[in-house]
Amino acid sequence: MSEEKFYFQTEAAELLNMMISSVYSNRDIFLRELISNASDALDKRRIETLKDSELAENTNPEIKIEIDPDKKILSVSDNGIGMTREELIEYLGTIAKSGTKEFLKAAKDENAKQELIGQFGVGFYSVFMVAEKVEVISRKLGTDKTYKFTSSADGSYTIEEVEQRGECGTTVKLFIKAQDDKKEDPDSKNYLDEWTIREIISKYSDFISWPIIFKDKTINSQKAIWQRPDKEITEEEYKEFYKHLTHDWQDPLTHIKINAEGSTNFKGLLFIPSQAPYDLFMNPQSGGVSLYINRVFIMNDCKNLIPDYLRFIRGVIDSEDLPLNISREILQDEPIIRVIKRSTTRKIFNELKKILKEDREKYIKFWKPFGRMFKEGILQDRENSKTLINLALFRTTHSDEWTTLEEYESRMQPGQEGIYCLAGRDNLAALKASPKLEPFVKKGYEVLLMSDPVDEVILSDSRFMWPEDMKKLLNIAQDDVTPQTADEKKESEEKIKSLEKDFELVKNKALEIFKDKLEDVKPSLTLTSSPACLREAAGGISFQMEALMRSAGHPVPPQKRILELNAEHPIIKKLIEMTQAGNNDERVADVIKILYDQSVILEGAMPEDPAGYAARVNELMKIALEG
Ligand code: ADP
């Protein structure tokens, strides 16, 4: 039977090259990866044979490790699900993992490379850190053909049909690289040495639920870690279990142990990863909690076990009360699952509360990658909105530190009606520069700076949907929110009235130019350094939200806004003079257009006619420079 030659997909080849020259300090993990893959393959086979009993071959499921120091071969075999010829090509010849391109781009220099390898997790390819050649011999469950994949990581691999494997499953044969004795490498280990192998397995893979056979004996305890008492388990064991489960190469941020006893019994071990995986936002389904029933693996990523906005949580839930043959469809309506979900969610909240209280730094580490997702829950999970909002962190004008709403409230000024908020852009620095903050900052009020896209939805939701006893969020971008007491409001309204006459001509002109875009033009007494700003009419939406909704295909009625002009500003004073003189119509129109466009830019949006805007600014600059 002849062998066929293939070339690795570009990214795969690059990644491979990187591995072969890698000096990644923890090379041992290649074995953890292989054993994890073998264990997954055994899980998959079990599930398949449950569905179709004809597939059950008469075997003992196991993972077998063998070493042959003379031939320099280390092999890992399993009698799991196996791979077809096409699957060998698809799984080993290409990398489907999203974010690979970005990863490779980021990993150009050697230091970055070492650091990133650990973050990205290269799975099977990690074998090339220790092997110069790899053979993967596999027979898929239910087929009678066996194929061999061979590669020396030189950009290509071959596939050929070989003599039939006795049983379905996979053998990975590593031809271990000769040790470079001249190079002083403290991490260099002999992977053909019996004790080295024993040590690595007991460190990384002891909890694997299938027997790992080495030198004719089972060498792992196979104890399900979530079933063991907490005090017996070391931090190291938790970490290794997490890595096995998630294929993440980094330590988790924290683990949450659940032991529910009562009408529904279940145990769980959940983890918050320390970083969002590369594809968390691109592929929101990549998280997940696995379901076990009585220690038997049932499925990965069981969505019904955890609310969608907690999809970054990983781990295991093991219930004694469910039937083993449960299907995905049935799960949805299974009352036990609903009970588990509720209680698990509560447990996660409690853990987060505890971290927030006791270890702020750790909490911020959780919040940075996952806060955005977590906040979706405020909108999705009405039952828990209150808990969720109290667990949220925000930026504010008070300092560069994160704050909770409770902390904000403790700093509120006497008589302050609610929490002042400014939402809008995906850019904190731009938000901080917004002229809308001026009157609030001038009066010493703190304002929340909400720069995540979901924040604005939360703001408008809070206005209409939140019960009385929930925090009152006030959107300062809206017309009716000002930092004034009732008396001050009255006083300034009178003052504005007296100014209105002066403003009348400017207002008429602006409304004439922007009849579709402006609802009103008002003098402002609260802006300090900026000449103008745009406000949303009460209940209106920001430019960003408008764009977001349009891009998602929602029809948005044209938004009319309010242009506020700073009555004290020299430009505005001059503008009023010019309109009153009545002989400079074109210049007046230009200035109004520039002020409007500027305000649009300050909202983080684009002027409708950028070229026209630039031309008008240039014209004024010319005059200023000549003058
Ligand atoms: P990951 O395990 O993170 O998906 P790997 O590079 O380790 O990435 O493996 C790629 C894929 O190859 C796996 O998802 C699996 O489908 C397949 N695979 C690897 N090892 C085995 C094995 N021993 N048996 C069956 N399939 C395997």
Image (cartoon, rainbow, N blue to C red):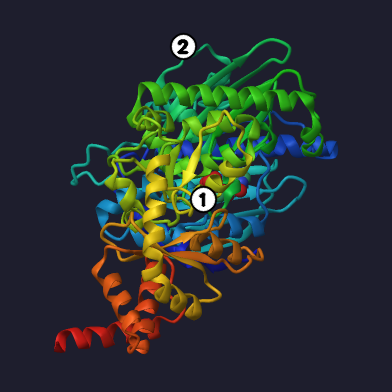
Determine whether the residue tagged by mark 1 lies in a helix, strand or loop. helix
- Compare marks 2 and 1 and give the one earlier in the sequence: 2
How many badges with numbers are in the image? 2
Could you say where residue 541 lies in the image, as x and y percent from the top left?
A: 54, 58
Q: Label 1 sits on what residue type?
A: Glu
Q: Residues within 10 Å of mark 2 (few under 14, many from 20)?
A: few
Image-quadrant location for residue 486: top left
Identified at 26% across, 65% down, the residue is 569
Residue 439: mark: none
The quarter of the picture where the N terminus appears is bottom right
For disc 1, the marked residue is 456
Could you say where residue 532 lies in the image, as x and y percent from the top left?
A: 35, 65
Identified at 77% across, 35% down, the residue is 332
Q: Label 2 sits on what residue type?
A: Glu
The quarter of the picture where the C terminus appears is bottom left
Q: Relative to residue 258, is residue 31 depicted above or below?
A: below
Give the left or right position of residue 589, taking residue 465 as reference.
left
Could you say where residue 407 lies in the image, as x and y percent from the top left?
A: 37, 29
Q: Is residue 22 visible?
A: no
Give the left or right position of residue 325, taking residue 397 as reference.
right
Q: Nearer the viewer, residue 452 or 409?
A: 409
